[in-house]
Every structure is written in structure tokens, then in C-alpha cells.
Image (cartoon, helix red, strand yellow):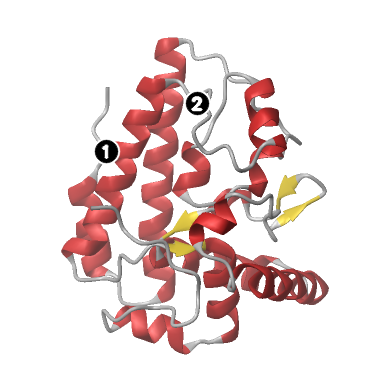
């Protein structure tokens, strides 16, 4: 199985000076992550229940890091029309209003639809975070149960264990690469962090200065 190119990512980030250069480093990391995902699925013959237009999992809380949020914001600014940007900003504002009063646990036990979902499809699919790329299911009924019983956080997922473990390891190596260089590795909630960066350009400079990028986004406490 191929190795995740952590040192290459560290080198790419260290050389980056502009948002475009950081974006390219992030895109290279996502491409490597997707290649690892595809390789394991093909090698093991993993049968997925996931399919285009299925969005049952898009009501889960999505934890991300600042280095994943900025490429999404750049993608929206570059590829969305003015009307599409206005619409997503409205949805993000409503999402933030709903999520910010909640604890991460309260959020995780409610079905709050991702504000980036449109017509049962991810509007930023090409730059979606690694936690979304890692998520998969081998049984749609299990996904439906999770949606119908959001407070049952102990219900087992229908992941392929080897695939999930390998992708989790690759995610951690990605996080470690940014942390190694002193960048913010706070765990943020996607919608509230994206809402903040699209409204506050200073968040980018804070991140570049190795400070916490988002001052108002929902934060998930790191594990022990």
C-alpha cells in the first residue's frame, strides 16, 4: 500500500507564500488521500452503499481544520456566481445562528443539514474536507438508522474497518504536517468556520501568523 506523502506536504507548505500556493499544497494532499482511498477499496473489493445524490450523512457535524476551510472559501469565491455566493452566505448565517448556541455534543445529536448541500449534492465536492472523504458506508439501512435516531451515538457505523483506519491515519499525518510548521490545529465545525472566514478576511492573516484562525466558530475539544 502506498505511503501518504507527509514530508512532501510539509515541504510544499513550507514553500508556500500565497493563498494559491497553499491551495495547491492542500489539493495535492487531497489527491493523495483520494488515491489511497481508491487503492484500498479496489484492493479489498470494498462494496460501498454510497451513491450520487445520497445525502443522509450530510446532517452530521463536520469537524475540520483551518487549512481545510480556506480552500473551500477560495473555491466559493472563484467558482460560485454572485447569486450562488449570496445564497450560500444566507445558509451559512442561518447555520451559524443555529449551531453556535449548542455544545458540540448537542450539535452531534441533532440532524442539522450541512449548509453546503444543494439538491442532495455537495456544492463544494471537489474541495470537501478529509472527514467527509473518509466517511463511507456499506449499509444504507445503518445510515438511515443514524439519521432517524441522532441521539444514539453508540450505534455502530457501517464502515470497512481497514479503510476507515487507514484514512484516519492519513488524516492525522495531514494534521501533523501543519502542526509541525506551527499552524493552527484547532478542531473547528465546518459551517461556522466557513461563515467566519467568508466574512472576516483577517482570519487568513491570523492563520498565516500561526494564530488561531477563527475567533467565533464552534470548536470541538481535542481528545486526551
Callout 1: helix, strand or loop? loop
- Residue 187, how many percent across, how many down? 38, 62
- Residue 119, how many percent across, how many down? 82, 48
Residue under label 1: 4
- In the image, taking residue 35 as reference, residue 98 lies left or right, namely right
Q: Which mark is residue 156?
A: 2
- Residues tagged 1 and 2 counted as in contact (Cβ below 8 A): no
Q: Quadrant of the N terminus?
A: top left
What is the quadrant of residue 112 in the picture? Answer: bottom right
Mark 2 burial class by Cα count in 10 Å: few <14, some 14-19, many 20+: few
206 above or below 36? below
The mark nearer the N terminus, 1 or 2, is: 1
Q: How far is disc 1 from disc 2 in space, using C-alphas?
A: 27 Å
146 above or below 151? above
38 above or below 54? above
Residue at the spot 35% in from the left edge and 21% down from the top edge: 162
Residue at the spot 67% in from the left edge and 65% down from the top edge: 79
- Residue 122, how many percent across, how many down? 68, 49
Residue at the spot 46% in from the left edge and 37% down from the top edge: 134
Q: Which mark is residue 160?
A: none
Residue nearer the viewer, 12 or 66 = 66
Residue at the spot 45% in from the left edge and 89% down from the top edge: 202
Residue nearer the viewer, 84 or 149 = 149
Callout 2: helix, strand or loop? loop
User: Residue lying furthest top in this view?
Assistant: 45
Amino acid at each position: 500500500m502506498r505511503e501518504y506523502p507527509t514530508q512532501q506536504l510539509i515541504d510544499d507548505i513550507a514553500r508556500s507564500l500565497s493563498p494559491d500556493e497553499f491551495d495547491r499544497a492542500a489539493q495535492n494532499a487531497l489527491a493523495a488521500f483520494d488515491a489511497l482511498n481508491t487503492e484500498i477499496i479496489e484492493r479489498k473489493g470494498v462494496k460501498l452503499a454510497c451513491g450520487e445524490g445520497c445525502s443522509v450523512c450530510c446532517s452530521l457535524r463536520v469537524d475540520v481544520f483551518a487549512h481545510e476551510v480556506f480552500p473551500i472559501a477560495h473555491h466559493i469565491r472563484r467558482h460560485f456566481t454572485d447569486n450562488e455566493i449570496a445564497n450560500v452566505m444566507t445558509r451559512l448565517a442561518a447555520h451559524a445562528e443555529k449551531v453556535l448556541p449548542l455544545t458540540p455534543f448537542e450539535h452531534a445529536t441533532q440532524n442539522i443539514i450541512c449548509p453546503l448541500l444543494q439538491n442532495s449534492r455537495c456544492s463544494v465536492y471537489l474541495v470537501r474536507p478529509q472527514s467527509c472523504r473518509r466517511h463511507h458506508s456499506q449499509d444504507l439501512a445503518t445510515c438511515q438508522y443514524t439519521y432517524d435516531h441522532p441521539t444514539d451515538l453508540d450505534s455502530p457505523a457501517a464502515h470497512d474497518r481497514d479503510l476507515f483506519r487507514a484514512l484516519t491515519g492519513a488524516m492525522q499525518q495531514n494534521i501533523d504536517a501543519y502542526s509541525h510548521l506551527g499552524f493552527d490545529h484547532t478542531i473547528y465545525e465546518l459551517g461556522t468556520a466557513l461563515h467566519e472566514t467568508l466574512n472576516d478576511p483577517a482570519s487568513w492573516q491570523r492563520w498565516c501568523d500561526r494564530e488561531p484562525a477563527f475567533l467565533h466558530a464552534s470548536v470541538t475539544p481535542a481528545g486526551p
